[in-house]
Image (cartoon, grey):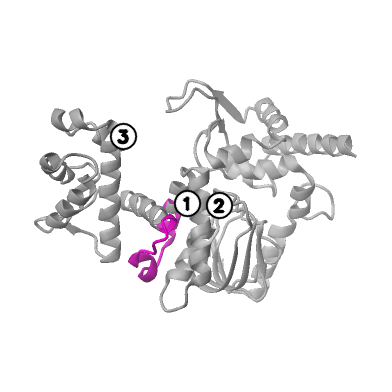
Amino acid sequence: MIDREAQKFGKDIEAVTTSESRAEFVIRVMEEVARDLAENQSNAIPSDTLTWLAEISAEDIVPASLSGILKNRSGVLAFLKDDDRRGYKNFAHEQVYNYFLARVTIRSISQGEIPKFVRRNIFGADFLESFSEVFRSASGDDSENFIRRALENFNSLGEQDRARQNIASLVLSACCVFTPSEVPVLRNVSIDEVFLTETVTHLHLQNTTINQLSAAGADMRALHFDAPCAIYSLIADGSTMPHPSIPTPTVVSLPHRTTYDPEEIGHWLQHQFNASIFRSGQSLSDAFRDFGLFDLLARVARYKPYWIKDGDEKGARRILDDENWPALKEILVTHGLLIERTDVPASGRPAPFYHIKNRTALMNLDNPDEAIGAFFSDVFEASIKLEDSTD
């Protein structure tokens, strides 16, 4: 959609710019609109403010004599719509707003800036989910730089505003789709909301309090809670996989029930630790640690994009570069659970695309149906063979 908007500036602009520079203009204007709305805690921006933001964004793209065309174009970009108030614009959808706000958050923190909205606002689960998806597309170097700068700021800031807790929340969401070169440690912080998804990389929390942890479907086996830590509310489901060090939440919200009973919560956590179709007496965490095929399967089943592309995307590389991928791929094909195509329209070099069918069922290792149970049995058998071959 950004590329399409970049083709609508007319011949005068196209003659002195590239499609890449026009796309960059669109991105920068929308990022700054999102920043302005977040910092003013508003849902609409005055048209004259939009024009001013477009003028600033156009400075390095076209001669001053042509900047008026870009300014006029900014008011009719497809990402924006007319607000109910005359002379105001807002984003066409909240997801569009969250997308550009996530982009400007990554860019700002990576450049050493802590925007006002990071210091003042409360980040909700919807924004944090969008942030995680946007962070997925960042390059490895940009991702590493963001984590480094974020942790530097986290360790140097005081508690006079929300910056530390918001940065901690961003780092946690980012580490669901990226593995930093060093293990992040977040300590002495109270966080309003944390959103976790897919497979969380190795992290340590120390003396940390989380008001609400959204972790439905998340594999948190690498997220260590070093005492003293506390969680007030946990949103989870049957495929949530916590680390044994997780503190007992005050309330657990599951798809079909919510419980405040400490005993019931304790039983549920124990079930999530130990539910296993593998060896008698072996916990689920032990089985995943011992069997690389199941560990990879957990990552594959939780990968959110429809296609796993054999390209540069970080989450896909965590799957396709795993030494167990060829063996798991063969079993998935045998059971009709993998689609491989090479004709999917996409930018970049030609590459195979993989789609995993029935991923929800593959996340539930407790009481699977007959077909999925047969698949798990084959994975388990292959795991035993691999284990024996390395002894």
First reached walking from the N terminus: tag 3 or tag 1: 3
Residue 119 drawn at (x, y percent): 38, 69
Q: Quadrant of the N terminus?
A: top left
Q: Amino acid at mark 1?
A: Ser
Q: Which residue appears at 48% of the width and 47% of the height?
A: 142
Q: Quadrant of residue 208?
A: bottom right
Quick check: marks 2 and 1 in contact, CB under 8 Å? yes
Residue 129 drawn at (x, y percent): 45, 53
Q: Which residues are magenta?
A: 109-130
Quick check: marks 3 and 1 in contact, CB under 8 Å? no
Q: Which residue appears at 50% of the width and 68% of the height?
A: 154
Which of the numbered marks, if any, corresponds to residue 176?
2
Where does label 3 land, which residue?
Answer: 20
Q: Nearer the viewer, mark 2 or mark 3?
A: 3
* Side of 203 relative to 117 (left or right): right
In the depicted view, which residue is nearer to us: 238 or 95? 95
Q: Amino acid at mark 2?
A: Cys
For the view shown, which residue lies furthest in the bottom direction?
160
First reached walking from the N terminus: tag 2 or tag 3: 3
- What kind of element bears circle 1? helix
Taking the magenta stretch, the answer to whether it contains residue 111 is yes
- What kind of element bears circle 2? loop
